[in-house]
Amino acid sequence: MTNCVLCKEGLKPEEGQLIWRGDSCRIILVSDPDLPGFCRVIWNHHVSEMTDLTYGEREHLMTLVFSVEEAIRDVMSPDKVNVATLGNMVPHLHWHVIPRFKDDAFFPGSVWSDRTQKTSASTLESRMQKSKDLPAAVRELVSRLN
Ligand SMILES: [Zn+2]
């Protein structure tokens, strides 16, 4: 699909950075000033639903999602991790893996809900610094899968 943003793999710096890429999936650290550590696991080919994948493919994708969750827990020490797939805006299979904190801008709603509060700048800066360790932590966990 030529008009699908996830079929185009290039990322502008303001969109995030590629953490890891395999034959079927890639993992992105999303650049979101409100939500440091927000990661996305993207199926490389354009399919829309989990049930478009074979059982083996589903297992591979979810194993990567849970590796990202584990890395996020280790590095970010969040109050909660949100794992979600929606695809209503971009019907190209991808999972969001998001560290959540009781003082983040949207807590306790989803990150797509209205803002509930303002996180202090120093807290956001500290989390942004921590999130710089995520790429290496994710790659380390993923490397152990094979
Ligand atoms: Zn696509």
Image (tube, helix red, strand yellow):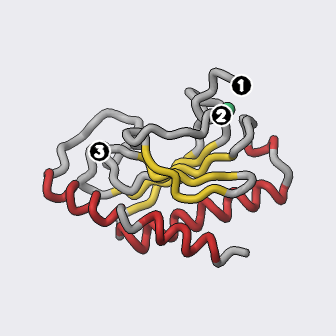
Quadrant hosting residue 131:
bottom left
The disc labelled 2 sits on which kind of residue? Cys
Residue to which mark 3 is pinned: 33
* Residue mark closest to the camera, 3 vs 2: 2
Amino acid at pointer 3:
Pro
How far apart are the two marked residues, 3 and 2, measured between alpha carbons? Answer: 24 Å
Q: Residues within 10 Å of mark 3 (few under 14, many from 20)?
A: few
Between 5 and 111, the one lying in front of the other is: 5
Q: Cβ(mark 1) to ligand 1 < 8 Å?
A: yes
Q: Earlier in the sequence, mark 1 or mark 3?
A: 1
Residue on which disc 1 sits:
1
Of callouts 2 and 1, the N-terminal one: 1
Label 2 CB less than 8 angstroms from ligand 1: yes
Which of the 4 image quadrants contains residue 109?
top left
SS state under label 1: loop
Q: For mark 3, give the secondary structure.
A: loop
Q: Is residue 86 left or right of residue 13?
A: right
Left or right side of 54 for 17: left
Q: Name which residue lies at 55% across and 39% down.
A: 10
Name the residue beneath numbered marker 2: 7
Judging depth in this view, the residue of 8 and 64 nearest the camera is 8
Q: Pointer 2 and pointer 1: residues touching (CB < 8 Å)?
A: yes
Label 3–label 2 contact, CB within 8 A: no
